[in-house]
Every structure is written in C-alpha cells, then in structure tokens.
C-alpha cells in the first residue's frame, strides 16, 4: 500500500468481456461445466473480435453491443445444446 502498486480499479469495465470469454469457451451460466482451455480459447476469440472492432474504427458503445450479442448467442446455443 505504501508503493501504491495495487489499484482496485484496474479491471473495472472488463466484466462483460470476461463473461463473454467464459461463455464462448463452453462455460455454462447455470454452472457445473467449463474448462480452463475453453476459457482461454474464448478469451482469444474475444480479443480478436475486440481488436477487429477497433481496427474497423467502431465506437466503444458498438463494441459493447457486439459483445452483448455474442453473449446472447452463446447462451442461446448453450441452452439449445442442453435440451
């Protein structure tokens, strides 16, 4: 605390990307399944998508909509798969 190297606000705003990475990687929002490798693959996919949106010059609010759409699609696919 004296060196001020720990900042509790470092990852504020990344919650949506983290949830998207886990869901894309095969984790279920109802719990009980998922893997570290799947989460890493999901994080890689989210990084590519976020980087592509930035390269295309899309504003942040559009990137958030894209991320939300990916989460909705991944959850719908997960629900359909577990029918």
Image (cartoon, rainbow, N blue to C red):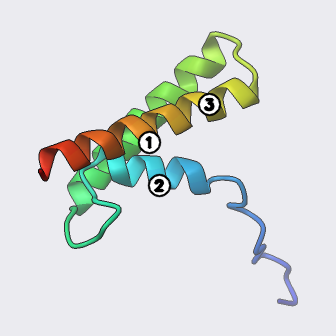
In the depicted view, which residue is nearer to us: 27 or 48?
Answer: 27
Number of marks in the rendered image: 3
Q: Which residue was labeled with disc 3?
A: 65
Q: Position of residue 52 (x, y in %)?
A: 54, 18
In whole angstroms, how far apart are the C-alphas of marks 2 and 3? 14 Å
Provide the secondary structure element on which disc 2 rests: helix
Q: Position of residue 9 (x, y in %)?
A: 78, 67
- Mark 1 neighbour density, 10 Å: few (under 14) some (14–19) many (20 or more): many
**Dots 2, 1 in contact, CB < 8 A:** yes
Q: Is 78 left, or right, of 7 in this rendering?
A: left
Provide the secondary structure element on which disc 3 rests: helix
Residue 79: image tag: none
> Residue 24's quadrant in the figure?
top left
Q: Position of residue 46 (x, y in %)?
A: 45, 37
Q: Residue at x 73, y 63 (%)?
A: 10
In whole angstroms, how far apart are the C-alphas of marks 3 and 1? 10 Å
Q: Which residue was labeled with disc 2?
A: 19
Residue lying farthest to the front in this orientation? 83
The quarter of the picture where the N terminus appears is bottom right
> In terms of sequence position, does the residue under pointer 2 or pointer 3 come before the other?
2
Q: Is 28 left, or right, of 65 in this rendering?
A: left
């Amino acid at each position: 605390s004296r060196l001020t190297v720990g900042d509790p606000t470092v990852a504020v705003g990344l919650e949506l990307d983290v949830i998207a990475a886990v869901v894309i990687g095969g984790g279920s929002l109802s719990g009980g399944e998922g893997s570290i490798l799947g989460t890493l693959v999901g994080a890689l996919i989210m990084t590519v998508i976020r980087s592509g949106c930035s390269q295309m010059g899309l504003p942040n609010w559009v990137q958030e909509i894209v991320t939300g759409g990916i989460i909705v699609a991944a959850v719908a696919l997960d629900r359909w798969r577990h029918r």
